[in-house]
Image (cartoon, rainbow, N blue to C red):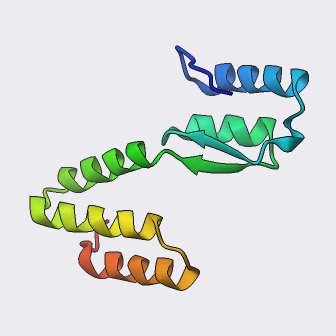
């Protein structure tokens, strides 16, 4: 099921999710995908505390790129960091994930 909501604040999102929970069996819901908006995460966790929240990869990559560019980082460094984030997102093991995390830490400036 998908829903498009015009004004996405915590109250409206919470009301919409409560409506769904009241009318449908949410016990079978395992994951909710949201963009990077914290109000969506809070509303989803409040309505369905058992679910896993997954963030939209496209929106996360956009946010990461903007954050790095906002720090005045060179384009090639931004691209390298984005590539590592992508590899980390696709990591198949915890060890691999942590290796990419370490690589990011070594490349990113300390203020990040």
* Residue 61 x %, y %: 35, 50
* Residue 47 x %, y %: 79, 35
The quarter of the picture where residue 32 lies is: top right
**Left or right relative to 20: residue 14:** left
Residue at (75, 26) in percent of width and height:
17
Q: Is residue 74 visible?
A: no
Residue at (57, 17) in percent of width and height:
5
Image quadrant in which the C terminus is located = bottom left
Compared to residue 109, the image places residue 18 above or below, namely: above
Q: Nearer the viewer, residue 93 or 19?
A: 93
The quarter of the picture where residue 88 lies is: bottom left
Compared to residue 74, the image places residue 31 above or below, namely: above
The quarter of the picture where residue 76 lies is: bottom left
List the single residue furthest toward the top. 6
**Left or right relative to 33: residue 78:** left
Image quadrant in which the N terminus is located = top right
**Left or right relative to 101: residue 44:** right
* Residue 87 x %, y %: 38, 69
Q: Nearer the viewer, residue 101 or 110?
A: 101
Residue at (59, 35) in percent of width and height:
39
Q: Is residue 85 visible?
A: yes
* Residue 95 x %, y %: 53, 85
Q: How many marks?
A: 0
């Amino acid at each position: 099921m998908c829903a498009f909501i015009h004004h996405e604040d915590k109250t409206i999102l919470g009301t919409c999710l409560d409506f769904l929970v009241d009318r449908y069996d949410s016990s079978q819901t395992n994951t909710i995908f949201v963009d990077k908006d914290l109000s969506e995460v809070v509303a989803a966790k409040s309505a369905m505390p058992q679910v896993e929240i997954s963030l939209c990869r496209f929106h996360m990559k956009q946010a990461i790129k903007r954050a790095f560019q906002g720090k005045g980082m060179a384009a090639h460094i931004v691209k390298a960091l984005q590539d590592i984030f992508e590899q980390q997102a696709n990591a198949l093991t915890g060890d691999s994930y942590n290796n990419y995390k370490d690589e990011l830490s070594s490349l990113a400036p300390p203020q990040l």
